[in-house]
């Protein structure tokens, strides 16, 4: 039967979301001229060769995702699927992906191509960064990975993981169009793996420089808050939010507690008190804290939903905030990064000449900087007028100056290590956009959001003056975080339909308050993805949620 539509992205679009992203791309195009698949015989092995087809204008919808169609059983006949989706399968690392999807939907993985060639799923043939991982899950046992340290599929000791907010076994960097398997370092940090199974961090992410302390050598001493300061994490499921709204809460990766040492260097004074990131929701102070402009955006999004401006469906339904991590260096604006740098400097072996050079650089822009000889005065300067935009820019300049190559060579605190130390181990080395580690109630059914300004707050946030949502707003977090494209398919459909690239999409989420209505179809897709990733995490020793 001739194919009428092409599902997923075309070859020229692969750089947007990469291999895994293509499986979750809610788009189809009418086929004007079908692509052609032929096979090149080389030394007895047949290699597929593809010609590009000609397509009409794209159409968008959740039901057009290749992964959704496969998991939902819409492609129940794998041989017909091979005939119907040659281009999507070409983008999915050849017939191995199709065989894996067959296993995921209850088949044997033994297929016959449109040319009559038999193919079988071979786990050894699937690349380390392949999208087959979430599709196959644990239908078949994959071979043990050779990774540092002890444990099955882990780096270091077998530390019991936190169930809420776990990173999937395979993660996507949407901006770069890359996918990686993940493991765990001895300190509990999740880490990417390269094709050979070794710890890896993409260039210019946590540190713009290509030099610095390797991630396997970074260390920190961190003390969680006393019991009762944060409520215990709660695992929730997408089905708990069917018929409700999700609004993105873009935030940095910082954590909640006290940081007292980085790379063996004790922090001056009492150390750095952290109270940010996903865990803020567990502090029972509000649904979210941020700058006034960001809180206004959330407040206005609630009003838009209540006014039916996003559509009549669910305009009175509950509205929730769902966290989505910003880029690796997003914490530089907060007090945490600059304060940690300043508390490290007094206990480091930095020459007086280099300290003076740093002071001079800061004073070129901020003449009132008191210098480094009096750490208390410098810390007071960093925290002066802390809730203003100017104070944030001052902290950012301080951090970026220390991060510059010249001062990194002079022995100032290693910036990659500082950024890692203030961040949650689960996300510190992961790509941006992990969604769903924490969810809070922004507005109850039919209600508007409750907003409080600085003068109305008894216990204000360390960096941000405004809060939104009731004190008991925390609802929980997904057991496994989602790719942002899967969490907000409507926004991705709209932006990609306008021709936005991934940097543009990231900007929209970082400064906007995107909303997604949780339809039964989307809930079903997200739940299946989470369960499949849980099975894979268990298999590789990264999850133990059975006690």
Image (cartoon, rainbow, N blue to C red):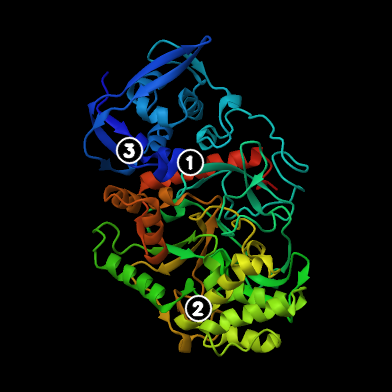
Q: Position of residue 278 (x, y in %)?
A: 55, 64
| 395 to the left or right of 351 | left
Q: Position of residue 324 (x, y in %)?
A: 48, 59
Q: Is residue 197 above or below residue 221?
A: above
| 532 to the left or right of 241 | right
Q: Position of residue 485 (x, y in %)?
A: 41, 49
Location of mark 1 (residue): 528
Q: Nearer the viewer, residue 389 or 21?
A: 389
Q: Secondary structure at mark 2?
A: helix
Location of mark 2 (residue): 392
Q: Secondary structure at mark 1?
A: helix
**Which numbered disc, 2 or 1, marks the residue closer to the eye?**
2
Q: Is residue 41 above or below residue 90?
A: above
Q: Earlier in the sequence, mark 3 or mark 2?
A: 3
Instruction: Let me know if residue 9 appears in the view.
Output: no
**Which numbered disc, 3 or 2, marks the residue closer to the eye?**
2
Q: Position of residue 7 (x, y in %)?
A: 33, 34
Q: Is residue 361 above or below residue 154?
A: below
Residues tagged 3 and 1 counted as in contact (Cβ below 8 A): no
Q: Nearer the viewer, residue 292 or 399?
A: 399
Dot 1 crowding, Cα within 10 Å, few <14, some 14–19, many 20+: some
Dot 2 crowding, Cα within 10 Å, few <14, some 14–19, many 20+: many
Q: Secondary structure at mark 3?
A: helix
Q: Quadrant of residue 373?
A: bottom right
Q: Earlier in the sequence, mark 2 or mark 1?
A: 2
Identified at 38% across, 76% down, the residue is: 293
Location of mark 3 (residue): 64
The CA distance from mark 3 to mark 2 is 43 Å
């Amino acid at each position: 039967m001739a194919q009428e539509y092409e599902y997923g992205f075309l070859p020229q679009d692969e750089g947007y979301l990469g291999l895994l992203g293509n499986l979750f791309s809610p788009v189809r195009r009418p086929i004007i001229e079908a692509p052609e698949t032929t096979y090149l015989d080389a030394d007895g092995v047949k290699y597929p060769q593809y010609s590009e087809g000609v397509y009409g204008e794209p159409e968008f919808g959740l039901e057009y995702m290749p992964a959704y169609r496969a998991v939902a059983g819409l492609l129940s006949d794998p041989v017909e699927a091979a005939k119907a989706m040659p281009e999507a399968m070409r983008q999915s690392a050849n017939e191995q992906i199709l065989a894996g999807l067959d296993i995921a939907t209850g088949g044997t993985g033994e297929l016959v191509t449109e040319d009559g060639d038999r193919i079988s799923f071979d786990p050894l043939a699937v690349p380390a960064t392949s999208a087959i991982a979430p599709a196959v899950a644990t239908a078949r046992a994959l071979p043990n990975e050779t990774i540092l340290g002890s444990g099955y599929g882990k780096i270091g000791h077998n530390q019991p993981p936190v169930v809420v907010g776990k990173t999937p076994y395979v993660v996507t960097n949407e901006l770069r169009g890359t996918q990686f398997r993940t493991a765990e370092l001895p300190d509990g940090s999740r880490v990417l793996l390269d094709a050979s199974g070794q710890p890896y961090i993409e260039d210019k992410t946590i540190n713009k420089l290509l030099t610095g302390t390797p991630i396997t050598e970074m260390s920190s001493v961190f003390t969680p808050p006393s019991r009762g300061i944060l409520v215990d994490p709660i695992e929730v499921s997408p089905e708990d939010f069917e018929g409700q709204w999700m609004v993105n809460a873009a935030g940095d990766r910082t954590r909640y507690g006290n940081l007292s040492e980085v790379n063996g260097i004790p922090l001056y004074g009492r150390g750095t008190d952290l109270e940010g990131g996903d865990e803020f929701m567990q502090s029972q102070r509000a649904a979210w804290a941020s700058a006034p402009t960001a809180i206004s955006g959330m407040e206005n999004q609630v009003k838009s939903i209540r006014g039916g401006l996003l559509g009549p469906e669910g305009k009175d339904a509950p509205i929730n905030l769902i966290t989505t991590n910003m880029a690796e260096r997003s914490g530089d604006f907060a007090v945490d990064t600059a304060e940690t740098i300043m508390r490290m400097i007094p206990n480091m072996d930095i020459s007086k000449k280099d300290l003076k050079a740093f002071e001079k650089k800061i004073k070129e822009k901020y003449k009132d900087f008191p210098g480094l000889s009096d750490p208390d005065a410098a810390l007071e300067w960093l925290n002066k007028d802390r809730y203003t935009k100017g104070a944030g820019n001052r902290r950012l300049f301080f951090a970026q100056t220390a991060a510059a190559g010249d001062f990194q060579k002079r022995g100032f605190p290693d910036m990659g290590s500082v950024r890692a130390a203030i961040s949650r181990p689960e996300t510190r080395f992961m790509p941006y956009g992990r969604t769903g580690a924490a969810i809070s109630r922004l507005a109850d059914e039919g209600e508007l959001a409750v907003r409080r300004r600085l003068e109305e707050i008894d216990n204000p946030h360390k960096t941000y003056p405004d809060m939104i949502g009731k004190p008991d707003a925390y609802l929980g977090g997904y057991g496994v975080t989602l790719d942002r494209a899967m969490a907000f398919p409507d926004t991705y459909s709209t932006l990609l339909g306008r021709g936005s690239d991934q940097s543009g999409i990231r900007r929209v989420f970082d400064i906007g308050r995107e909303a997604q209505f949780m339809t039964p179809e989307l809930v079903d897709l997200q739940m299946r993805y989470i369960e499949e990733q849980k099975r894979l995490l268990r298999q590789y020793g990264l999850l133990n949620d059975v006690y």
